[in-house]
Image (spheres, rainbow, N blue to C red):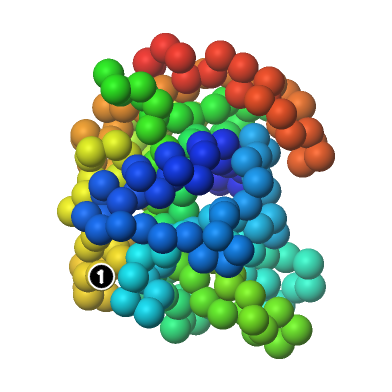
Amino acid sequence: MCGRYVMFSTTETVLAATSRLVGEQVGAVGGGRPPTPSWNIAPTHTVGVLRRFSGAVTLGPAAWGYPAPWRAGTVLFNARGETVFDKASFRGSAPCLFVMDGWYEWKDRQPYYVSSRSDAGHEPMVVAGLCRPGQGADRGRLEATMVTAASVAPVAWLHDRMPRVLGVGEVGSDETVAWLDGSDGVRRTLAASPPGAGILGTLVTGEADRRVGNVSANCADLIGDAGLTRD
């Protein structure tokens, strides 16, 4: 579930949108820029995540997925919100936020692109995540995994899981801040619940190009006109 997503918004757009959601200025670290825009982000790729670092909320790079200790080459790129805090694989993780313009999901071998659109136009979404420093040979880099929730309308028909979207545009500021700065109990509650109605009401879905199944394919044509009409 949600093994591919899209991030094409400019650095300036991401910093402005996330600053509104967290109620403070978000800065960029790790070279000053998030990874290059991509229309086909896959596990192990370097992605942009937000976390509280040295007292400030910052946007910086992370490897998408925790290496699985039981199988070389396998990564834990998402985690079920209902059980993530009880799994040894994620113990000791810190909260973070993935930023995305949309995600892909497949139904009967047809890929679909899910994004957010409101009267104000397209807005990037922030999604609950967990992060930790890399282990062993990967020490020195950040690793991150995405939290998922039970899927609900308007995307329940597509898959039984979805990213735990916390905020988009002006909606979800309280949950976004609570995920970053709240207690473990607060994060447990958020992780185990679906996105709020205000966020779900902005989601739009449309068919994507089948080439997205090839991780080397990476162009704006992959999303086509998907998401231009609300479901």
Question: In this orientation, does residue 150 appear?
Answer: no
- Left of 107 or right of it: where is 172? left
Q: Measured along the vertical axis of the image, is residue 114 above or below residue 125?
A: above
Residue 34 pos. (x, y %)? 57, 54
Residue 183 percent location from the top left of the image: 22, 75
Q: Which quarter of the picture shows residue 92? A: bottom left
Secondary structure state at the residue bearing disc 1? helix
Tag 1 residue:
181
Name of the residue lying farthest toward the bottom = 136
- Image point (48%, 60%), residue name: 28
In terms of depth relative to the viewer, which is nearer, 159 or 162? Answer: 162
Residue sitting nearer the eye, 9 or 152? 9
Q: Residue at x 27, y 27 (%)?
A: 201
The residue lying toward the viewer, choosing from 48 and 144, is 48
Give coordinates of residue 202: x percent, y percent.
31, 27
- Assess disc 1: are there few (<14), some (14-19) or many (≥20) residues with their C-alpha within 10 Å of its C-alpha: some
* Occupied quadrant, residue 141: bottom right
**Hey, what amino acid is under mark 1?**
Asp
Q: Could you tell me if residue 3 is visible in this image? A: yes
Q: Is residue 91 left or right of residue 166?
A: right
Residue 11 pos. (x, y %): 50, 45
Quadrant of image for the C terminus? top left
